[in-house]
Image (cartoon, rainbow, N blue to C red):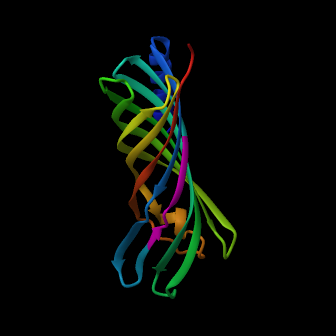
């Protein structure tokens, strides 16, 4: 994870040196529910979902060319994850609603398509980075944290209200590899834990604001 972050930071620095334009972007989206689960046998399984909710974020984008840019992003989301699981023949099925906080740190490569009047601008891009998940079990107060590889893509548009300020509309999907299950969720119950993980998919719709910085 550290290598991904350092590579992302280096890429942003390289692009920033030759940037023709710098933008500050603020994001607010609704992210929908996503289910997860693992089944090995009748005594070794889990299933649940990360509930939908608001995802907030901020990004700094450097455009080295009028139609191409690189953006360093941070997204935050807090939600509940109601889950059911059984681990081992000597345990009964258990249920817990975990508190889950996610911190996404991503690097995006953006392609921009501008209209003739410069008021409308479409964009799309691929995102790559990491997610840090903090999980708390309210029944015991136990806490765990883990970092995982994350990637995604998005499509959207900017509506420029002036030469400096625009409104963003976008659809986005993020995937966190092996981000649910395992010791992160189910390591609180004595010597038993589920060692397997599943991948999380989060689809969001929303928008935000974009600001051109400088002169």
Number of numbered discs: 0
Residue drawn at x 55%, y 48% as measured from the top left: 56
**On the rendered structure, is 98 left or right of 122?**
right
Magenta stretch containing residue 143, yes or no? Answer: no
Q: Report the magenta residues as a range.
A: 48-57
Taking depth in this image into account, of 94 and 13 the one nearest to the observer is 13
Horizontal and vertical percent position of residue 30: 48, 56
Residue 177 location, x and y as percent?
39, 52
Residue farthest right in this picture? 141
Q: Is residue 153 above or below residue 137?
A: above
Question: Magenta stretch: residue 49 in it?
Answer: yes
Residue 8, x across and y down, in percent: 46, 29
- Residue that appears at 33% across and 34% down: 122
| Figure check: 145 above or below 163 | below
Residue 63: image quadrant is: top left
In the picture shown, does residue 67 fall above or below 47?
above
93 or 41, which is in the foreground?
Answer: 93
- Placement of the C terminus among the 4 image quadrants: top right
Q: Position of residue 136 (x, y in %)?
A: 63, 65
Residue 145 in which image quadrant: bottom right
Q: Residue at x 34, y 34 (%)?
A: 123
């Amino acid at each position: 994870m550290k290598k991904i972050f350092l590579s992302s930071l280096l890429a942003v620095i390289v692009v920033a040196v030759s940037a023709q334009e710098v933008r500050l972007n603020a994001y607010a989206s609704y992210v929908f529910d996503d289910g997860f689960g693992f089944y090995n046998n009748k005594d070794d399984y889990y299933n649940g979902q990360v509930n939908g909710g608001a995802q907030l974020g901020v990004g700094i984008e450097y455009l080295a060319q009028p139609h191409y840019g690189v953006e360093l992003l941070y997204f935050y989301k807090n939600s509940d994850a109601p889950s059911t699981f059984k681990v081992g023949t000597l345990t009964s099925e258990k249920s817990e609603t975990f508190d889950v906080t996610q911190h996404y740190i991503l690097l995006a490569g953006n392609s921009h398509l501008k209209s003739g009047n410069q008021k409308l601008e479409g964009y799309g891009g691929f995102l790559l980075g990491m997610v840090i998940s903090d999980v708390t079990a309210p029944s015991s107060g136990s806490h765990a944290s883990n970092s995982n590889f994350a990637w995604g893509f998005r499509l959207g548009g900017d509506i420029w209200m002036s030469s400096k300020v625009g409104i963003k509309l976008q659809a986005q999907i993020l995937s966190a590899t092996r981000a649910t299950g395992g010791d992160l969720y189910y390591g609180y119950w004595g010597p038993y834990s589920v060692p397997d993980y599943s991948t999380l998919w989060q689809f969001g719709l929303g928008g935000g604001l974009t600001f051109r910085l400088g002169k």
